[in-house]
């Protein structure tokens, strides 16, 4: 691999040697990266592929290749129990979408105030939101359940959406505040000189400039809501309101002998979030990088 040498003109000594742009890098880095990729993808591929097998194949050779392929497992999941899979997919979708919308709206407005205004207790408020990252949902699940019962929200979609919004806001504010703080004051002053109000500046300048961060937190909250299991397990009581993670549990309990169909159901439940996360992976990395720079 060719390198670029930096030489001291007076002494002729080589100060440093760095690889040229476009170099392939050290093979060990690629080997380690491939090992990590294999470890991450192997369980996912195992679940998807074994969904195309039957129970006899899995009993004789648990790690083998489907022979023959049995696509009927996926068909049985999609068409079984009067469309319960599609109902659960819809429940997961609209709960995730409403959660994302509320988190973005509240997060952008709060981050804008913390980033652009100077007032007493601003630092304390920011630290309060930052401290929310230290408390997992499992710690607060019992008080949340009691609160939802007293407010008569238990058993409804709001009992899942509102706590998800509350636990999603700290991460959202931590990511968006540096984005909004990095907007030059000159832009804000120029907007005010041109007759733009504070709300106009917020909607016309702040929101478009913060879109990388907004997309990042939207993806993270959507995937987190889609994969949420504990909160719907505690809050939802009616099977018609179940989300896909609860649907996987219910399906596995009702079809405990049909291992291949359980794997097929699991595959269908995780594929949408997996595809969504993979498509917007660069947006996530770009948004987090911008937050760190800010």
Image: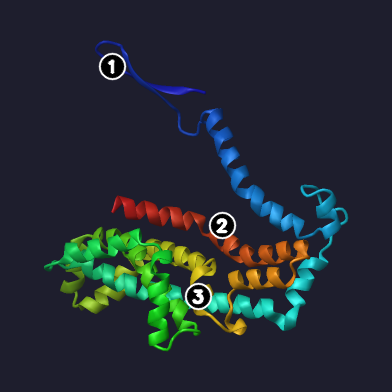
Q: CA distance from mark 3 to mark 1?
A: 68 Å
Establish if 165 lies above or below 71. Answer: below
Which tag, 3 or 1, sits closer to the chain's start?
Answer: 1
The quadrant of the rendering that contains the C terminus is: bottom left
In-front residue for pair 257/164? 257
In-front residue for pair 136/4? 136
Name the residue tied to disc 2.
Answer: 278
| Image quarter of residue 70 | bottom right
Q: Which mark is residue 128?
A: none
Which tag, 2 or 1, sits closer to the chain's start?
Answer: 1
Q: Position of residue 265 (x, y in %)?
A: 70, 67
Establish if 1 lies above or below 237. Answer: above
> Mark 3: which secondary structure?
helix
Establish if 94 lies above or below 51. Answer: below
Front of the two marks 3 and 2:
3
> Mark 1: which secondary structure?
loop
Q: Is residue 237 left or right of residue 189?
A: right
Name the residue tied to disc 3.
Answer: 234
| Image quarter of residue 139 | bottom left
Q: What residue is rendered at 39% in x and 76% in y?
A: 144
Which tag, 3 or 2, sits closer to the chain's start?
Answer: 3
Asked whether the viewer can see residue 196, the reply is no
Q: CA distance from mark 2 to mark 1?
A: 46 Å
Q: Position of residue 40 (x, y in %)?
A: 59, 48
Q: What residue is rendered at 48% in x and 72% in y?
A: 231
């Amino acid at each position: 691999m060719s390198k670029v040498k930096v030489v001291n003109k007076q002494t002729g000594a080589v100060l440093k040697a760095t690889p040229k742009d476009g170099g392939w890098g050290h093979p060990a880095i690629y080997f380690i990266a491939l090992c990590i990729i294999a470890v991450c993808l192997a369980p996912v591929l195992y679940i998807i592929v074994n969904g195309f097998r039957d129970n006899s194949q899995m009993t004789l050779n648990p790690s083998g290749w489907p022979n023959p392929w049995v696509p009927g497992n996926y068909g049985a999941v999609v068409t079984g129990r009067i469309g319960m899979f599609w109902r659960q997919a819809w429940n997961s979708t609209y709960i995730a979408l409403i959660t994302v919308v509320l988190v973005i709206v509240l997060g952008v407005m709060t981050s804008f105030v913390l980033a652009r205004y100077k007032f007493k207790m601003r630092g304390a408020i920011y630290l309060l939101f930052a401290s929310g990252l230290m408390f997992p949902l499992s710690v607060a699940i019992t008080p949340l359940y009691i609160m939802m019962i007293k407010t008569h929200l238990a058993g409804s979609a709001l009992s899942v959406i509102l706590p998800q919004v509350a636990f999603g806001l700290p991460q959202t504010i931590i990511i968006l505040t540096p984005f909004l703080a990095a907007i030059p004051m000159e832009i804000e002053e120029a907007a005010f000189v041109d007759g733009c109000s504070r709300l106009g500046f917020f909607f016309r300048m702040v929101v478009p400039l913060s879109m990388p961060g907004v997309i990042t937190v939207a993806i993270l909250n959507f995937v987190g809501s889609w994969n949420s299991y504990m909160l719907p397990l505690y809050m939802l009581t009616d099977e018609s309101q179940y989300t896909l993670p609860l649907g996987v549990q219910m399906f596995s309990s009702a079809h405990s002998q049909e291992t291949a169909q359980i794997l097929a159901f699991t595959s269908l439940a995780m594929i949408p979030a997996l595809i969504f996360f993979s498509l917007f992976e660069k947006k996530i990395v770009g948004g987090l990088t911008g937050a760190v720079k800010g």
